Amino acid sequence: MGTLNEPHLLALDGGNSKTDVLLVAEDGTVISRARAGAFVPHIVGATAAVASLAAAVTEVLASTPDGRAALVAGYLANADLPEEELAIADAIATHGWGDHVVVGNDTLAMLRTGTDAATAVAVVCGAGINCVGIAPGRPTVRYPALGRITGDWGGGFGIGKEVLWYATRAEDGRGPTTGLADMVAQHFDRETAVGVATGMHLGTVDRDRMHEIVPLLFQAVDAGDAIAETIARQQAEEIGLLVTNTLHRLDLLQEPVDVVLGGGMLTSRHPALLEPVRAAIRSVAPLATIRIVDAEPVLGSALLGLEHLDTITGRTGDSGARRRNLRLSLSTRQESRA
């Protein structure tokens, strides 16, 4: 555990289902952790979204002498635009949790979770889908990631809607037959897939359960369902396109580069999704190293936070040791919670 007078890091990783909060000592040791609910500023606004974290933050900051950290590093889902990052940072600052605040999109945290390299591309395909690419001396490549209105397709929520689209059309005769219709109906204890869709519309089926459709899609793929295979193939194409387009924009197609893949859909490692993605990347970027990230996303928030803490404090020394301490400390605490 860190000393009482050392600078502490408060790391936040906000997702569409939960938010992890860590208090980290300057040597990378995790002092305390807590968990809050979903981080959804795009629905409730930045002020309310940040306020929803207050109880968890207060819990971990109780381990500091003055209830504050030197730095709050928040890498958060739904912080997709610079304006959103600024609004969230301002909301965090009003709570007085730390002397400095840095806010970024959670895709950046996932990238750092998977690699320490200065040149890398990361794709998150979980509830949503997003991508980021970084290289020294080149502008960071980002995407608005606001859904179909900004050219995005897929992620768990999008896949769920696509499956329901095919399933309901199969039931009413507008589309080809698919086993997904019966699978969806049975999973949600409804007579039809249309009943699931109308239930979500009326609120009798929680729309937040949309992601539960993704495992059904992969089960249907394994059963040889043609529609399921079509959906999985399109998702793989979109992920591959995000990576290859980002590599092209950074002029990295012929350079060694880490490609980090994370989020629930990709960490499932289903071959119908992962193999086409690998093939698409290798076909244009033969020197790329593809990494699948299973570690907790909050690890990336803390790693990036430690980098910023070095800058703020002017600290030098073995940053590699701090990263190793953080990874070990976090994994130990994760095992103790299991």
Image: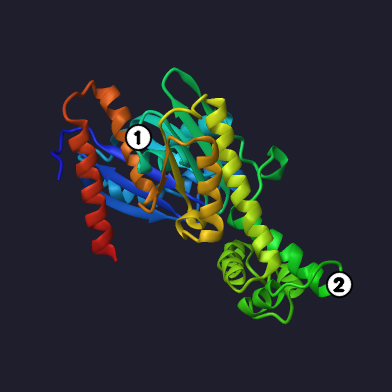
Q: Is residue 231 among what the camera can see?
A: yes
Question: Measured from the top left, where is residue 133 in percent x and y?
Answer: 49, 32
Q: Is residue 189 placed above or below 206 in the rendered structure?
A: below
Question: Measured from the top left, where is residue 201 in percent x and y?
Answer: 74, 65
The crowd level at tag 1 (other Cα within 10 Å; few <14, some 14-19, many 20+) is many
The residue under label 1 is which amino acid type? Leu
State the residue position of label 2.
173
Closer to us: 281 or 219: 281
Question: Measured from the top left, where is residue 112 in percent x and y?
Answer: 37, 38
Quadrant of the rendered image containing residue 36? bottom left
Q: Is residue 94 among what the camera can see?
A: no
The residue under label 2 is which amino acid type? Gly
Q: Is residue 297 left or right of residue 129?
A: left
Closer to us: 190 or 158: 158
Mark 1 → mark 2, Cα distance in angstroms = 52 Å
What residue is rendered at 56% in x and 60% in y? 272
What residue is rendered at 37% in x and 36% in y? 73
State the residue position of label 1.
304
Quadrant occupied by the N terminus: top left
Quadrant occupied by the C terminus: bottom left
Q: Is residue 225 placed above or below 251 in the rendered structure?
A: below
Circle 2 — which element?
loop
What residue is rendered at 27% in x and 40% in y? 67
Quadrant of the rendered image containing residue 230? bottom right
User: Looking at the image, which residue sits at the far top?
Assistant: 137
